Amino acid sequence: MRKIGVVITDGVGFRNFVLSDFLLEAENTFDEVVIFSCLPTHVFEGLHKKAKIIELTVFEEKFPTWFFRKNKELAHLQCHKNDNFGILDNLHSNYTKAISIRGFSTRLAFLITTFFHSEKWIQRFNKLQQYSFKNNAITKQYLSILQEEKVDVLFFTHQRPPFIAPLIFAAEKLKLKTAAFIFSWDNLASKGRMAGNFDYYLVWSQLMKDELLHFYKSILPNTIEIVGTPQFEPYVLDRYKTSKESFYTKFNLDASKKTICFSCGDISTSRNDELYIETIAYAIENKIIEDLNFLVRTSPAEDPIRFKKIVERFPLIKWNYPKWSLSREGHQEPWSQRVPSYEDGKDLIALVEHTDVNINMLSTMSLDFMQFDKPVINTVFGNATNGLYDDRRFLKFVHIMNVIESKSTRIVFNKDELISSINHYVKNPKDDSEKRKQFVNLQVGAPLEGTSKRIVKTLQGWSNQ
């Protein structure tokens, strides 16, 4: 009897591993599937056949855990800051001048990790973090659950959220095999440390495997498997297909016109989105761009209230507000509790497949549109001196430098370049097609077809070792 435990940490993990074929494949392959959910159980209703759902009590960090985690994460950033601008930028963003216990403690952690940030010290800080869970009531609850379920492998669908660390600790105590999926294309090259150590790792591509080995010296190559990502698997699943006619009807688009789409980031990193949307809408309104349908998809991680004035000012814009519902109030990371609907998955795939050009501020959505070989324009008007939010600094992040080197998108620095690029790609949609395909192959190192089957087969093999 083979039994797998699957840890769903947030709404994106829910999209990737529940709304794809992963759960179906897991239920067909393993004798038993247990979902350990950091989301309320009601979000799974009607979406599984055999899996057992266990809602985990929400873990909230105490100060000692936070302090050791902060040292671990800062040590990781300090260790790699010299050869990576994204890591250095992340390190700077962690600094605070706050007059509070956490403010003083953060500055102390900066001081400590300035001197002690080798991989050995990172592992020491991790052990202290894990030791802080020893007498925690919720950790004991997790231990009890894992003892009762006796899974052969515990699969974490995201490697970074701090609230999964006590579950990792419980698995370590019980000597359970653990595996983690590297969540996103930028997680290794610009984000902080993982929540803990795992026995096995699933990655998108050879590029991501190389990054993992670079940033985590204690990981052995034979514990890493390249599987692609279920993030894009729905693009090849028939149940998500929508005709172009149905898409145009749903969003009230003019079937005689081509359609461009601006996909927003959230306000934490994409603060100039209003400017980009207004620039495009004004150009269409004043015939500077040919008459097009203009559709905007807002970020599922935030309320789209910041676009209210644009909605009122430009009725020509059609809006796609992602159907992600907040499943729980009062969580320490509220964005993680936003859960997508099946309908939103269909809307997104229809949008990506049936629009003609995408514009975004260096978002992973570039990869979404490239799955259908759609031209992509990346907007970066802001710099350190022109008064706009400095989104141009992201060009120095490693994962974005790969975009630049691939020449798979047009990166535009001002209004004229943006308008010129839109006009060009609308008329010449196949330009840069080969470069887009090469970039997709670099980032997603396995076919979309069979992604879930590939992941489940890998996990099955590890469970048998």
Image: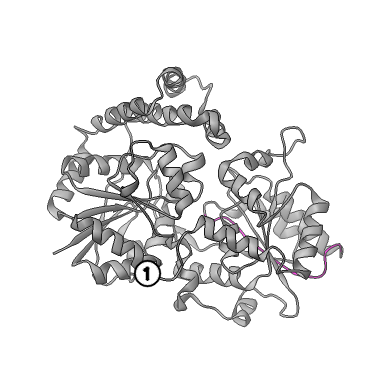
The x, y position of residue 65, in whole percent, is 32, 30
Q: Residue at x 58, y 60 (%)?
A: 438
Q: 386 or 204, which lies in front?
A: 204
Question: How does the figure colour the protein chain or chains?
Answer: one colour
Q: Residue at x 21, y 57 (%)?
A: 463
Is residue 45 in sight in this rendering? no
Res. 160 image quadrant:
top left
The x, y position of residue 323, in whole percent, is 51, 63
The x, y position of residue 7, in whole percent, is 30, 53
- Quadrant for the N terminus in the image: bottom left
- Quadrant for the C terminus in the image: bottom left
- Magenta region: 288-300
User: Which residue corresponds to mark 1?
Assistant: 21
Q: 159 or 288, which lies in front?
A: 159
Q: Identity of the amino acid at label 1? A: Asp
Main SS, magenta region, reads: loop
User: Regarding mark 1 in the picture, which secondary structure is present there?
Assistant: loop
- Quick check: is 424 in the magenta stretch? no
Q: 414 or 43, which lies in front?
A: 414
